[in-house]
Amino acid sequence: GGAGFIGSHVADALIARGHEVTVLDDLSGGFRENIPAAARFVHGSVSDPATVDRVFAGPRFDHVYHLAAYAAEGLSHFIKRFNYTNNVIGSVNLINAAVNTGVTTFVFTSSIAVYGTSAELPMTEETPVHPEDSYGIAKHAVELELHSCKDLFGLNYVIFRPHNVFGPRQNIGDRYRNVIGIFMNQIMQGRPMTVFGDGAQTRAFS
């Protein structure tokens, strides 16, 4: 996912700290120009086990930052096979390769979708999870898989659950995700910003 919005910034930060970086991305949601020139780039999908195994057969990785996913919460109910293939099976392919090659730490980009819509606010890491859509279920399944791999194989992991992330390289052409991008697009077109509800609600952005 290193060609995507968040992943490309992670790659930049790692290179700036002197790390050697390999980016695996199928460019379905990212762009080649986002990938740092100093990174090794492999064009392929995490859902293809042969590609994943080929990447891990090269130089040994100390850390894996997994940001590849198809993020579409509301849509995920209607594309269940696609959702689980990309977001669960693809993640498991990476986790298996990480375990088999002695990766030190696996960093997984989960989602605030694991909490569902009924969680009490403000949410904390101790808030019980209750995913209500296929996307959130997939993310939580991978979290559970990482817990299991820690116990069974000693794979260290970090899970973070971003919410409403915005910043440079964000896709503002998507009409259904990333509300800051949607607002920016509407403003640039001279259209009113779409607000659901009475406008009195608050929301946190990262």
Image: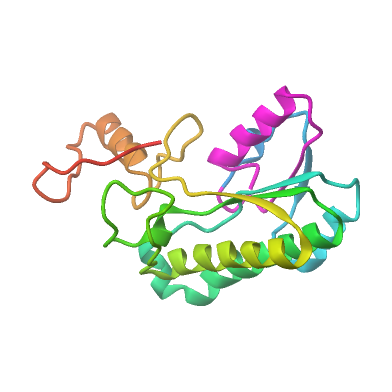
Q: Quadrant location of residue 15?
A: top right
Q: Is residue 77 left or right of residue 187?
A: right
Placement of the C terminus among the 4 image quadrants = top left
Q: Residue at x 40, y 73 (%)?
A: 77
Number of numbered discs overlaid on the protein picture: 0
Q: Residue furthest left?
A: 198
Dividing the picture into quadrants, the one containing residue 179 is top left
Residue in the picture at 80% in, 61% down: 99
Give percent across and percent down for residue 166: 42, 35
| Relative to 68, 114 lies left or right | left
Q: Is residue 42 above or below residue 89?
A: above
Name the foreground residue: 129 vs 13: 129
Q: Nearer the viewer, residue 6 or 45?
A: 6
Query: 61 and 57: which one is in front?
Result: 61
Q: Taking 104 as reference, is 183 left or right? A: left
Q: Position of residue 180 (x, y in %)?
A: 33, 37
| Residue at x 85%, y 54% (from the top left corner) | 102
Q: Is residue 90 visible?
A: no
**102 is higher (above) or lower (below) than 165:** below
Is 114 colored magenta in this rendering?
Answer: no
- Region rendered in magenta: 1-29
Q: Position of residue 38 (x, y in %)?
A: 78, 29
Relative to the observer, which residue lies in front, 164 or 34? 164
**Outermost residue toward the right?**
58
